[in-house]
Image (cartoon, grey):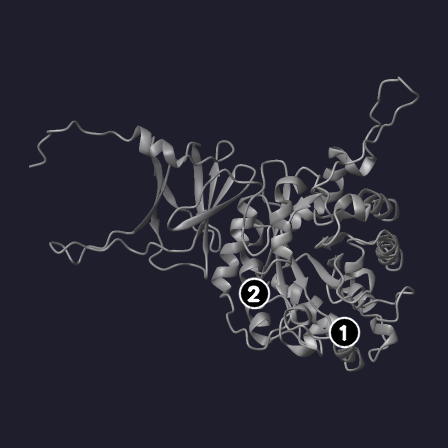
Amino acid sequence: MTRDAFDRRTWLRRAAGLAGAGLAGWSQPARGEWAEAGAPRIAAAPPVWDTAADRERRMRWWHAARFGMFIHFGLYSLLGEHEWAMDREGIPIPQYERLAQHFNPHPHAARAWARLAREAGQKYMVMTTKHHEGFCLWDTKLTNYCAPRQACGRDLVREYVDAARAEGLRVGFYYSLMDWHHPDGYRCKSDPAARRRFVEYTHGLIRELMTQYGKIDVLWYDVHWPLNAREWESEKMNQMVFSLQPDIIVNNRNGLAGDFSTPEQHIQAAQSGRAWETCMTINDSWGYQRADRDFKTPATLVRNLITCAGGGGNYLLNIGPRGDGSAPEPEAQALRAVGRWMARNGETIYGSDRCNCKSTPFASFTRKGNTLYVQVHSWPGRTPGSRWMPFFRPPAVAAIGGLRTKALSARVLKTGQKVAFRQDDLSVQLTGLPAHAPDAPVSVIAVECAGEPRIDPLYVREHRQRYKVGVSWS
């Protein structure tokens, strides 16, 4: 993402204090009105989709999934210069529109994305149906600036939906409210007539997405600039969405709180009880950027996924396909490497619960019920011998300070090898570990506990036995 005044991240920061409460800079209309002059106001019951019980029902699969694929794909993919190229390079609209005359991705591109997502261990996909550039990838009746009416001649959203379902993946639609192409996309900020036209246009596009492709699992709004939630009629927008897709979940980027929060390019757990999903790129770009070679390693991606799952959140990891629809090979290789790790260790991620255990210098943690998964990213190896006894190499030991729950058993997850341990008031010490890491890039030790595992690092600092000043150490 860019770091200037009107990028996605900046607008999220501006609204952060209010969006989390569902306000985003406006006073949400009351659901109850005066019955008559002088009568007390009686708040109407919230709609079914806005209740905790219905949200829990709709999001159950999403919490279990933990890992999804984000796909940024559009005309900018042909340029290979970042998805904000139209804005950042000041490309005139008539010049940018010519890209639509050459945008014709391979018919099987979406199938390759879906297979890659399945191989990576991802359970759902979210694709850009319309990014900020304003080009629609589906068969819309509201504009000719769409894939089926340009060189492509095909409904790319339909191809994506069919491909995802063929691989058993849940289907999500990204939709940018901001539009650099539509004549009212900025004029709506100050012109009421333009605002009316543009809001109706936007609601109409979303209605098409919600009615033309069967059951949709996620609607992922983005950047509500230049309007606020009241001006977008965001509550009406969501009411329409849920009336057409009663099982869908929506994010918080149309100015309302939505079902989940969306930290971008960083991992930040929401407060307990609030669902969240970190979206992140594999390199530094969302759309295809041919010059961006700063790819994250599989080890980094696995550790990010573990951190998200441990905090009770999801990890939505992006690919930026080329103009022909092919995924850059470094991104595909990294995802397949993550998938190989997930094939062995998926139980530590899928369906995991929020874990009240902070990471240590050598490990992070996830949990499922009373099972604590110690995700060891720096394997201890054998304890080095001293200069007095260089031949002596005690078995490897890993200690977890501040575990306040009784440990019952431990095992290496990959091999099933039992791990001996001893536990005292300050820590549990896992002893006799293999000399070499049994897995890569992260090895897992499953520790069964007598209750929900909880690690309190301050407990060690506060309760460790200390000696009086003046004690002789000779």
The quadrant where residue 105 appears: bottom right
Q: Residues within 10 Å of mark 1 (few under 14, many from 20)?
A: few
Residue 270 in the image: state x and y as whole percent: 58, 41
Instruction: Please name the residue that numbered disc 1 is placed on.
Output: 93
In the rendered image, residue 408, in percent from the top left (x then y), is placed at 44, 36
The nearer-to-camera label among 1 and 2 is 1
SS class of the residue under badge 2? loop
- Residue 436 lies left or right of residue 8; in this view the side is left
Q: Residue furthest left?
A: 474
Left or right of residue 173: residue 436: left
Please name the amino acid that badge 2 sits on: Ile
Image position of 113 (left or right of 161): left
Q: Residue furthest bottom?
A: 102
As drawn, the residue found furthest toward the front would be 190
Q: Classify residue 173 as left or right of residue 445.
A: right
- In the picture of the structure, the residue carrying the numbered disc 2 is 282
What residue sits 59% from the left and 77% below the top?
290
Snapshot quadrant of residue 407? top left
Q: Residue at x 67, y 72 (%)?
A: 90
Q: Callout 1, which amino acid? A: Ile
Point out residue 25 in the picture as x, y percentages from the top left corner: 70, 41
Q: Quadrant of residue 234?
A: top right
